[in-house]
Amino acid sequence: MSRRPYQREMTSEWIFRHPRYLRYMTREFSCLFIGAWTLMLVCALARLSEGPEAWAAFLEGLKSPEVVVFHVVALAFAVYHSVTWFNLTPKALPLQMGDEFVPDGAISGAHFAAWGVVSLVLLYLAGAF
Amino acid sequence: MGERTIDLEVLRYNPETDSEPHFQRYSVPCREEWVVLDALNHVKEAIDPTLSYRWSCHMAVCGSCGMMINGEPKLACKAFVRDYEGIIRVEPLAHFPVERDLVTVIDDFMDKLKRVRPYIIPRQVKAVAHGEHLQTPAELNKFKQYSMCINCMLCYAACPEYGLIPKYIGPAAIALAHRYNQDSRDGGRAQRQEEIAATEGAWECSFVGACSDVCPEHVDPAGAIQQVKIRSTVDWYKEHLMPWLKP
């Protein structure tokens, strides 16, 4: 009897095999928007360094509908990215107190709380309220 | 007890006659409490004795009957037919070469398992006369869940990283290495690091998390892999920024 194992090819269809793979790819894909927004932040710093007129022109450019839409989409992806990662923190950072481990919700909850506080501080520093 | 006829679509591959696998359909009269493994056993006993598949315990302990059921890695002995509607498609575990029908070649996993040294490498050699190695409940809880692994390889079939990068050492092997690293009786972490802290070790993982989702024993390999990454990173910083700490 001869052995002739057959290696089945893996096609890109794996992404659609189960919703978890699609959720994972969405999380990975979100990096592109976060990266693009970060690049825009670098451009903003460059304009700022060029003087008040360049900075004013940059701010004016932010008001265009395309840029507003981009910001809304990037924010949605950034929130999805952050929420999915914070939900995973109990796996990476289990905390044992005594014999038992701290419940997952407490670890991810602490991250969400810290995120909320930091966001409020930033908004305060930015003069939002 | 209710009975219904289900259609099983099974991937068949005979290395002696087939150039590639193909699906074959069987109509199987199933009882309410049957699992997919019962249906396969019925096919083997009453319809087609040439069908090949692995199984042993029929109670989710031996880890032999892992297969893709409607595209999802499952133990055939734990997948109740009543939970499926329409045709049930049964294929060999994804990402492994097919030996024959539902039987896969598992040499790659066995080799990787061996490489991570999944056994206690004593921290301190202690003669039997000096008594047992005591362990507190807290020390036991550090690794207990990982010791539930039955080597069924469902996590490898669920992991796209393993499918794309076969050199990746994979979820179960890393989880088992982590299990022994977490054991208070063990002193073999440095030896295991050569395998699990390498590029093709934990760093190949991009945290899809599918391994933990499909584990029939509720082990969390995805968590183990992230913890290995964190400890390996701490190792690196200690070695490069605080060399005086090196033992």
Image: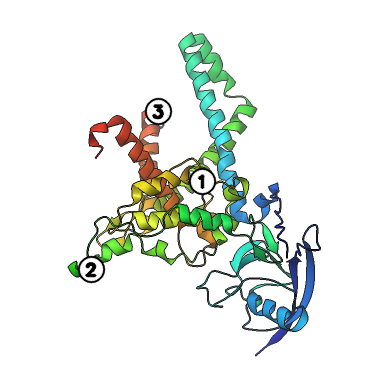
Q: Which mark is residue B205?
A: 1
Q: Which mark is residue A126?
A: 3
How far across and down, in percent of the image, does residue B82 sit?
65, 77
Q: Residue at x 79, y 69 (%)?
A: B24
Give the side of residue B224 with respect to residue B126, left or right.
Answer: right
Give the side of residue A69 with respect to residue B7, left or right.
Answer: left
Q: Are marks 1 and 3 on the same chain?
A: no
Asked whether disc 2 touches disc 1, contact meaning CB atoms under 8 Å apart, the reply is: no
Label 1 vs label 3, nearer the camera: 1
Give the side of residue B195 with respect to residue B22, left or right.
Answer: left
Q: Which of B118/B90 is in front?
A: B118
Q: Which of B142/B15 is in front?
A: B15
Q: Quadrant of the C terminus of chain B?
A: top left
The residue wearing badge 2 is: B128
Answer few, some or many: residues within 10 Å of disc 1's Cα (few below 14, many 20 plus, some between 14 and 19). many
Q: Is residue A7 above or below residue B237?
A: below
Quadrant of the image occupied by residue A5: bottom right
Q: Is residue A22 above or below residue B155?
A: above
Q: Quadrant of the N terminus of chain B?
A: bottom right
Q: Is residue B79 above or below residue A112?
A: below
How far across and down, in percent of the image, does residue B21 sit?
77, 60
